Amino acid sequence: MSPVSLVLLGFVCVALILQLASIALALAKQATRPTSGLIGTPMVSVLRPLCGLENNLEETLTSTFAADYPEFEILFCVASPTDPVIPLVRRLIDAHPGVAARLLIGDDPVSGNPKLNNLIKGWDAARADWILMADSNVLLPPDYIQRLFAQWREGTGLVSSPPAGIRPVGFAARLECAFLNGFQGRWQLASAKVGNAYAQGKILFWRRDLLDRAGGPAVLGREMAEDVAATKLVRAQGLKVRLTARLFEHPVGRRTFASVFGRQLRWSKVRRMGFLPLFLPEILMGGAPPLFAVIVLASAGVIPAISVAAFGVIWYGAEALCARSSGWPAGPVDMLAALCRDALLPVLWVMAWFGNGFDWRGTAMSAEIAKTKPTRGPDLAKP
């Protein structure tokens, strides 16, 4: 066997071991039942930033009111007084008179991140010492507050949850779920299981004093994404980010291929600029590179031709098992979407090196804008 064949064979074996190990770790994380958490049921303020109408929005916002928890308040944050989401929010508040909920309208340009600028007023108005920032497209289960507190223990600075994509409509939406679940969610769960959790901006659960001590939400605008800044801020204080055992769900609905690709390219750039050492191996993390290596080895007669099919069955069969066990989309079409995702990962990796900016909901964002000092708040890393 030639040296090149040995290298390729070694690469395939290592890639397959990492694939199976990450799946095992992700499943183990989801099976975790914390033995300790915060004692008591303190009041919680739930902040939901809103901008326009989107898939399943009424369902996800309504889920906020259904918390099975003694005392909480909901603060819906909207930047523009003409936003079309406002009538929906007012109708939902009127329909739930037993829940303390308010609509806050206005924009505070304290950073280059429009979502943070929208959230500032909610943070300032919140009455609780425990504050949840939850994106509008996340479906919150009745025990969502308990799930967050269950992960809060000594040494915790933030509890987060990546979104689990559910209910896709069309192949592009299934591709979105393949990125959210089988790639991002699975690797975040696996990383959390080995003690290296990092935040995801869909769900950020704070103890107020920890963020206020660093300067408040405005300092989260020092990075291209608030989850990157949140992770660095928490670690700078000698604390840990923790993930919920089960991911909070995101009803995906219908998507276009352009929107899926654009979103994944944006997130790839964020990971490159925020966590370069973790981003560098991403080009090799999908199934495409090792599958290509198996095809080369089989074509050269180094391994049997049936090895190509066997590799595909093991690789994507394990992902299907993980998805089914997790309650994620796991049918044959979803595995085809996973194969397409893996083919796109090297493309996204390469494209992520071109340019340090992107457009988010009509707002130009760049590394230069993110580095602009907020109008309030000390240095990000200062405890």
Image (tube, rainbow, N blue to C red):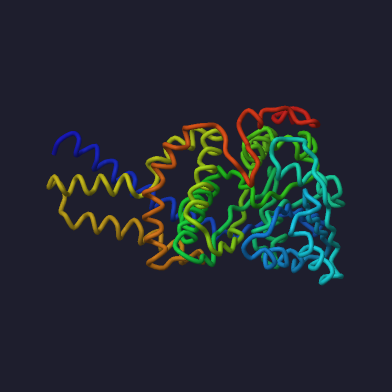
Q: Quadrant of residue 300?
A: top left
Q: Residue at x 36, y 55 (%)?
A: 339
- The image quadrant where one finds the C terminus is top right
Q: How many marks?
A: 0
Q: Position of residue 307 (x, y in %)?
A: 21, 55
Q: Position of residue 344 (x, y in %)?
A: 40, 47
Question: Residue 255: x and y, percent?
Answer: 52, 59
Quadrant containing the N terminus in the rendered view: top left
Q: Residue at x 47, y 61 (%)?
A: 174
Which is more toward the observer, 264 or 303? 264
Residue farthest bottom in this picture: 95
Viewer-nearest residue: 108 or 204? 108
Q: Is 176 situated left or right of 49 in this image?
A: left
From what the image shows, is residue 233 above or below residue 80? above
Vertical order, 347 against 56 (above or below): above
**Residue that protrudes farthest toward the front in the picture:** 82
Q: Residue at x 46, y 51 (%)?
A: 183
Q: Is residue 371 above or below residue 267?
A: above
The answer to which quarter of the image holds residue 93 is: bottom right
Say left or right for 227 vs 186: right
Left or right of 47? Residue 183 is left
Q: Is residue 238 left or right of residue 252?
A: right
Residue at (24% x, 48% y) in the render: 294
- On the image, the x and y values in percent for residue 47 come to 76, 53
